[in-house]
Amino acid sequence: MDWMAWTWPTAAFFGVIALLLITFTILAIKFPETPRTGILRIETTRGDRLFITLLGSAFINLAWLGLVGANQPYALILCLVYAAAVFRWV
C-alpha cells in the first residue's frame, strides 16, 4: 500500500465505509423497507439517507478544516449529530 501513501486513519475510513455498505445491504435484504417522505419532500430509503449523510459529513469536515483548522474530533461529533438528524427526519 506504499504506492498510494495510505495511512491507518485513511484505511480505517474506507474500512468503515465498506462495513456500512455491507451492513445496509444485509439490512435491505432482511428488512425491506418502503421509501418514506421527510422534510426534504423526496422519497428516501436507508441507503439514500446514508448517502446524504456521507456527502454532508464530507462537506462538514472540509468546512471545519477551512474555518477552524485542527481539532477534527469535534467535527466528527458534529457529523454524528448530523447523521442522527438525517436518519430521523429526512
Image (spheres, helix red, strand yellow):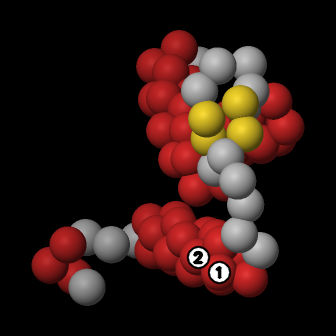
* Residue 79: x %, y % from top left: 70, 38
Q: Which residue is disc 1 drawn over?
A: 29
Q: Name the side, left or right, on which 49 lies relative to 21.
A: right
Residue 9 numbered tag: none
Mark nearest the camera among 1 and 2 is 1
Whether residue 68 is visible, yes or no, is: yes
Give me the residue at 58% from left, 56% from top. Answer: 47
Q: Secondary structure at mark 1?
A: helix
Give me the residue at 61% from left, 35% from top. Answer: 43
* Residue 89: x %, y % from top left: 81, 30
Whether residue 49 is visible, yes or no, is: no
Callout 1 touching callout 2 (CB < 8 Å): yes
Q: Residues within 10 Å of mark 1 (few under 14, many from 20)?
A: few
* Residue 28: x %, y % from top left: 65, 72
Can you say whether 9 is above or below 89 in the image?
A: below
Q: Secondary structure at mark 2?
A: helix
Residue 25 numbered tag: 2
- Quadrant position of the N terminus in the picture: bottom left
Give me the residue at 70% from left, 53% from top. Answer: 34
Tell me the CA gap for discs 1 and 2.
6 Å
Residue type beneath disc 2: Thr
Can you say whether 28 is above or below 37 in the image?
A: below
Q: Name the side, left or right, on which 72 lies relative to 8.
A: right
Q: Nearer the viewer, residue 10 or 86?
A: 86
Q: Name the side, left or right, on which 35 lies relative to 84.
A: left
* Outermost residue toward the top in this view: 67
Residue type beneath disc 1: Ile
- Quadrant position of the C terminus in the picture: top right
